[in-house]
Amino acid sequence: MTQAELARRMGISASYLNLIEHNQRPLTATLLIKLAQEFSLELSEFAADEDQRLAAHMLEAFADPVFEEHGLNSAEVRELANSSPAIARAVLTLYEQFQRARESLVELAEVSYATQEGHAEGAMNLRGEVLPSEEVNEYIQHHMNYFGELEQRAEQLWVAAKLKRGARFAGMAEWLERQGIGVLLSIDEQRIVRRYDRDLRRINLSEALPPSSRNFQLATQIALICHHDLLEQLSEDDPILTSTNSRTLARLVLANYFAGAVLMPYASFHQTAVTQRYDIELLANRFGTSFEQVCHRLTTLRRAGAEGVPFHMLRVDIAGNISKRFSGSGIQFARFSGACPRWNVFRAFQTPGLIRVQTSIMPAGDPNKFFCVARTVAHGRGGYGAPRATLAVGLGCPIDRAPELVYADGVDLQDEEGMLAVGVTCRLCERRDCEQRVLPSLRQPLQLREDVRGVSMYTDPEG
């Protein structure tokens, strides 16, 4: 729809609509109601999730010790984010540049030291560019991890290739053969799981991949070959993606999204998920996919009229590095610092292969109570001696939606005392009794005492 047409239907001028779209005029309650009536939308769909995330990122930025002497409080920061979002985003951009400059100086010092020791192997890029992964994370979050056009293309492939649940690989391979593209399984590939030879028009897949990964990689390659125009359109037209690398990574992520939609078609997957009460392992068995693939697919159930439980998802390695994150539940993730170690996704490493259940309560926010499950997963190829990586995947939802999950059976969801107190990150958490606190809270002045020691060095047990 053109801007002029939308303005006409809203009863305002195109120039005024343009100002609204560029955050230079507010979206008034009257216009919001008009939007809802004109397009048959629920007002709940306009929840201030974006505003809450902006405020959370601002709070995290101002939690940096560099701002400590200025006496900022959370109310002032939230007011800035709510009243002047454009200024808040500009401040965030400035802080991000500061962060990258600071990290570059540390890296430069390390390279300088390595050079003196004779270990430096090359020059370092000190331009302080935004990591493509960060921009793509923001891009996915902005679109709430739902791409309707990719869902349609996946459904069209099921019809065109006459796919069947137990024979998807053969069906996709036969369909590709009709397009003049061959598929070859090879045991010779060592560290490459998928390769497309454009000259020979042949897809090579590692025979060492488990069936779920093999299906996924083939569907991903179909997206990259046959739907590159759509992937390019979706990535090129979004201002969040500012670099070539970011747009390339976004296309790969979108191709993975398409693969998930092919392996787990929306309608049947959504119906089965609801019927089986989101039993992840049962869904994995039913659709021939992995635990992680199911978790990721569950976060994409955002189709109007057929929404699933709003989940957040987190994937971490044993060192605590976050390699995948998305919030559809309203939970806030740290953007500039480490996450709270009390989340059960980190504790999953203590019980490999077992699902851990956790009810948790955040210091503030709406929602602030969550129900989460987590389990370790293994990444790697088959074969004796093949290298493997152990990761942990966490999936959670607002606690009022937990009864829809099989994992909540027997759990007292009303027992606040039984909920584990968690936070976003230490600097934003004001709890004084956390044994895992590693930094002082922004909201509490640092008081160190030589004669009294509490559960943490950064708390005053008598304060």
Image (cartoon, grey):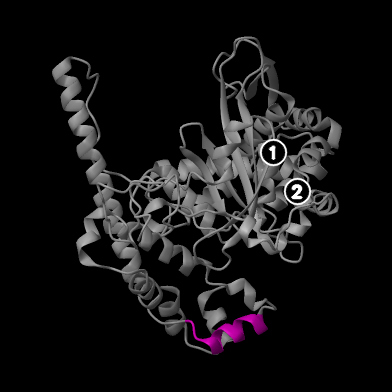
Residue at the (48%, 82%) spot, across then down: 27
> Looking at the picture, how far across and down is residue 201, in whole percent?
62, 25
Q: Is residue 292 above or below residue 203?
A: below
> Looking at the picture, how far across and down is residue 401, in whole percent?
71, 61
Q: Which of 22 and 347 is in front in this view?
A: 347
Q: Which residue lies furthest to the left in this view?
A: 116
In magenta stretch: residue 285? no
> Looking at the picture, how far across and down is residue 273, in whole percent?
79, 50
Q: Quadrant of the C terminus?
A: bottom left
Badge 2 amino acid: Tyr
Q: In this view, does 357 lie above or below 78?
A: above
**Proximity of marks 2 and 1: CB atoms separated by less than 8 Å:** yes
Q: Which of 241 and 434 is in front in this view?
A: 434
Q: Which residue lies furthest to the front in this view?
A: 451
> Circle 1 is placed at which residue position?
355
- The label number, if any, that marks residue 122 in the structure image: none
Disc 2: CA contacts within 10 A as few (<14), some (14-19) or many (>=20): many
> Circle 2 is placed at which residue position?
407
What residue range appears in magenta?
27-38
Picture quarter containing residue 127? top left
Left or right position of 281 against 391: right
Q: Nearer the viewer, residue 89 or 279?
A: 279
The majority secondary structure of the magenta stretch comes to helix
Residue 461 can be seen in this image: yes
In magenta stretch: residue 36? yes
Q: What element carries label 2?
A: helix
Q: In this view, does 78 lie above or below 29?
A: above
Picture quarter containing residue 161? top right
Residue at the (61%, 10%) spot, across then down: 188
